[in-house]
Image (tube, rainbow, N blue to C red):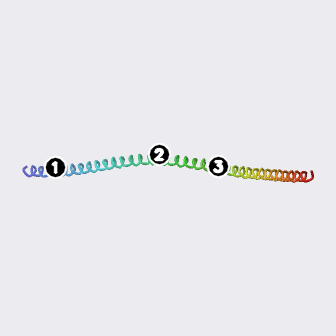
Amino acid sequence: MENSTEQGRIEAERAREAAERERQNLEQTRSDVEDRRANAEASRAEVEQLRVLAEELRGARERQRREAEALRQDREALRHIAEDARKAAEEARHAAVGALAATADALSANLAQMQFLADARQTLREMKEKLKSEG
C-alpha cells in the first residue's frame, strides 16, 4: 500500500507540476493578449491622431485653396483696373494732342490776325503820310 500511496503522491506531484505549467502557460497567454490589447489601443490612438491630422490638413488645404482663389480674383481685378487706367491714359493723350492742335490752330489764327492788323496799321500810316504829303 505504501507503494501505491507513493505512486499516488508522485502522480499528484506530476499533476500539480503539469497544472503549474498550464497555469504559467495561461499566464503567459494572458500577458501576451494584454500586450496585444495595449498595442492595439496604442495603434488605435495613433490612427485617431493621424485622422485628426489628416482632417486639419484638409482644412488647411481648403483655406489655402480659398486664399489662392481670392488672390487670383484680386489679380484679375487689378488687371482690369490697369487696363482701364491704360485706356484712360490713351484717351487723355489723344485729348492732349487734340488740345495742343487746337491751341496751335488758335495761336496761328491769332498770329495771322495780328499780322493782318499790323499790315493794316502800316497801310493806314502810309496812307496818312501820303495824304499829308499831298495835301
Q: Residue 30: percent from the left, percent from the top?
A: 26, 48
Classify residue 30 as left or right of residue 93: left
Mark 3 or mark 1: name the one nearer the start of the chain.
1
Residue type at mark 1: give it: Arg
Residue labelled with disc 3: 85
In front here: 12 or 57? Answer: 57
Mark 1: secondary structure: helix
What secondary structure is marked by label 2?
A: helix
Q: What element carries label 3?
A: helix
CA neighbours of label 1 inside 10 A, class few (<14), some (14 to 19), many (20+): few
Identify which amino acid the numbered label 3 is placed on.
Ala
CA–CA distance in space, label 3 to label 1:
101 Å
Q: Which mark is nearer the camera, 1 or 2?
A: 2
Q: Is residue 15 left or right of residue 60?
A: left
Earlier in the chain: of badge 2 and badge 3, it is: 2
x and y, in percent, of residue 12 in the image: 14, 49
Amino acid at dot 2: Gly
Q: x%, y% of residue 53?
A: 41, 48
Q: Mark 1 points at which residue?
A: 16
Mark 2 = which residue?
59
Query: Image point 73% across, 50% down: which residue?
Result: 99
